[in-house]
Amino acid sequence: MDSKRKLLFIMDTFPLGGISKSLLALLNELDYNKYEIDMLLMRQEGIFVPMIPKQVTLLPEPLSIEFRDPHPKNFLKNLLNLPFSEWLKWMGFSMKCSFARIMGGLHRHIQVMDVWLGKNTPSINKHYDAAIAYQGGRCIYYLVEKVDAKVKVGYVHTDYKMSEVDYMLKSTDKCYFPRLSAVVTISPKCKQSLIEEFPEIADKINVIENICSPRLICSLANDPINDYDESLDVGVKIVTMGRFDIQVKGIDIAIEAAKILKAEDVKFRWYFVGDGNQRPEVEKLISDNALQEDFILLGAKANPYPYIRQCDIYVQPSRFEGKSVALDEVKALHKPVVVTNFSTVYDQFVDGKTALICEMTPTDVASKIKRLIEDKALRNSLISNLQQEKVGNEEQARAFESLISLGLW
């Protein structure tokens, strides 16, 4: 008799970003002698898909790609591409979403779309000891509605009140969160945010931090790269990484800060590691500010750590973060950091000791960067303090195992 516990992880896609990296780190810490692990990606796309451990079984996509976009403009195209019964199903989906958008705007449209997908995505013909929706919205709704599992865990990776994407689903989440065995978030600040919004399930809300393995990061940081010339004299090398979400990640703040530094004759080159749908808008911002030679888009990198290893300063200009995976990775490489004062930043840094925390303005970001450039003693102090700080938290995998084992053993 197989004594392994059967686990299912659910994600929508597996793109560049902290959620994907944190799940990869967790999967690499689990003991495959103890667990038989399946993963369901609603759509098997994203830079990290090839990095899923080989011991994990990647299940087939449950819905045709046409269900990713319910817009009525696809009426005729989908009639040609889908079996008639599936087309009728898609038509009903499209009409519901369109009506929701007309009556309630984008927020209502997303609510209706995610609930429909949760209820209508085909189920998996298998019983699991524990199933984990590692993203919110449709992943949690699918877990609750369609997955046969003894323990059901839903993750929230943000400060719920500060995240527009999550908060717009609150009325629906109030129906689904109580049906979970547990809700997991990633920092004390994020937990408090959830408790304030969902006091009726306070006893179900748990903190399990995103896993950061300094040993693995430092090893990968030594990989060679060929699009970032270490010997090139470009002045101070600044790196930022993240997806192209201008508002959330504060890319506009970074570009304006770069413009200020250039106007003040600071010699630098700012590299952005990441990609996303808003790339054309980011390129236009760079062009409009005449920064094509100063603000370089390197694209998405499965291994961003060599770029961080070679930089002088790391800058995170975000307006919103849960508990930033990127920042924990930078801390593991002991790089001086300038970071904006989003709500959870103080869970990770002490201002003036392990980073310079600044206002969410281009002027203050530029000022803090310039201060680090000019004050070598401050730079060395930040590096020294980071070297003394415990960054690795692989033990969080044990906390995860304890949580999912409730009622299993």
Image (cartoon, rainbow, N blue to C red):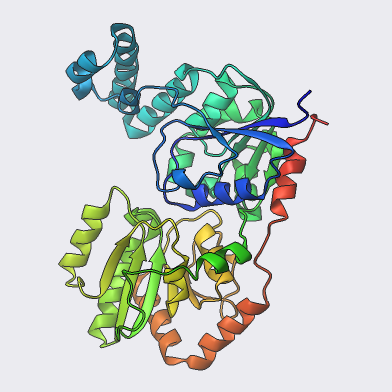
Residue 336 shown left or right of residue 34 in the figure: left
What residue is shown at x 68% (from left), y 78% (from top)?
A: 388
State the image quarter where residue 74 is shown.
Answer: top left
Q: In this view, does 162 lie to the left or right of 149?
A: left
Quadrant in which the N terminus appears: top right
The residue sitting at the right extreme is: 409
* Frontmost residue, 399 versus 8: 8
Which residue sits at x=70%, y=49%?
397
Q: Which of 261 and 147 is in front in this view?
A: 147
Count how many numbered circles sit on residues in the image: 0
Residue 358 visible in rendering: no
> Residue 61: horizontal and vertical position, in percent?
44, 27
36, above or below 250, in the image? above
Place residue 255 in its image quadrant.
bottom left
Q: In this view, does 203 lie above or below 369?
A: above
Residue located at (41% from left, 58% from top): 242
